Image (spheres, grey):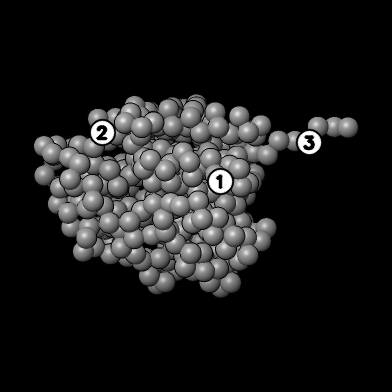
Amino acid sequence: MAARPKRKVIITCAVTGAIHTPTMSPYLPITPQEIADAAVGAAEAGAAIVHLHARDPKDGRPTQDPKYFEIFAKDIKSRSDVVINFTTGGAPTMLVEERLQPTLKLKPEVASLNMGSMNFGLYPMLGRYKNWKSDWEEKYLAESDDRIFRNTFKDIENILTSCRENHTRFEIECYDIGHLYTALHFLERGLLKPPLFIQSVFGILGGIGNHPEDVMQMKRTADRLFGNDYVWSVLGAGRQQMPIAAMSTVMGGNVRVGLEDSLWDGPGTLAQTNAAQVKRIRSIIEALNLEVATPDEAREILELKGGNNVGF
């Protein structure tokens, strides 16, 4: 009897993002060169997709200036066949039109898309740090107790319709159960096309928690709403990154790791590279007798347009 082929697990690596600031870790990629190097390293470690934000190289603050995305995207593409995924979330301080620009202009294979407005509380991290490297950091965290991360139905529709001709596949970021129903709404309207790439986000203050019951509820709801028309992936914020990724692997899902979501590579130990987190989750996947998907296998699973059909 022929051996049954092993299930392929897609690893996404979120290289840098809008949650953490330069003071929090000396290993956080800031410049376009650092972001490109980190992405290529993650790909070499086993990531099929790299999810990318940009930062102002002068002070590390989040930026959606397309010039930075173009610099690191071209560099990554020249050195790796990894799937490149841009954020349209940017940071909660940005307007939607600003957040949209890199994806609209550069037409990546994948882009993230948040499925709802929400409180996005970063202020509990304030007490952990002193001697901020840049003036913007402390204020950015402190003001998050009165900040709404805006993603209205009109905003979502605007992103979907603006990018329709780009044939970019969206990584549908769902921070709560209601966001799954919003994704269903746009699927039923024909603005989203299957297979949906659902990224369930756990542990952000303002969204669903990180208890195993939360993970199971998200999966059960997505199964009921989308059946075979979606691909499930998860990310756990902070110290729950690896436990939640391991749960997803066991439950038939895919995983996202990276310094955007967690700075850690074990209790009290900062991850020095994104690749370190990719290697850790890869060891878990392979210990479960599963295989890590290659970029081309991820393209097939998600029905992507291919790396030659982007705008960079």
Q: Secondary structure at mark 3?
A: loop
On the image, numbered disc 3 is attached to which residue?
A: 4
On the image, numbered disc 1 is attached to which residue?
A: 248
Q: CA distance from mark 2 to mark 1?
A: 27 Å
Which of the 4 quarters of the picture holds residue 193?
bottom right
Closer-to-camera residue (266/157): 266
The residue depicted at 55 percent of the width and 68 percent of the height is 184
Q: Secondary structure at mark 2?
A: loop
Instruction: Give the quarter of the figure containing the N terminus.
Output: top right
Closer-to-camera residue (37/284): 284
Residue 90 is situated, as x and y percent measured from the top left of the image, at: 32, 52
Evaluate whether residue 16 shows in this view: yes
Residue 163 is situated, as x and y percent measured from the top left of the image, at: 46, 59
Q: Residues within 10 Å of mark 2 (few under 14, many from 20)?
A: some
Q: Is residue 233 above or below residue 277?
A: below
Among numbered discs 1 and 3, the one appearing first in the sequence: 3
On the image, numbered disc 2 is attached to which residue?
A: 25
Q: Residues within 10 Å of mark 1 (few under 14, many from 20)?
A: many
Q: CA distance from mark 1 to mark 3?
A: 21 Å
Foreground mark, 2 or 1? Answer: 1
Residue 177 is situated, as x and y percent measured from the top left of the image, at: 48, 64
Q: Is residue 6 above or below residue 236?
A: above
Residue 42 is situated, as x and y percent measured from the top left of the image, at: 45, 31
Among numbered discs 2 and 1, the one appearing first in the sequence: 2
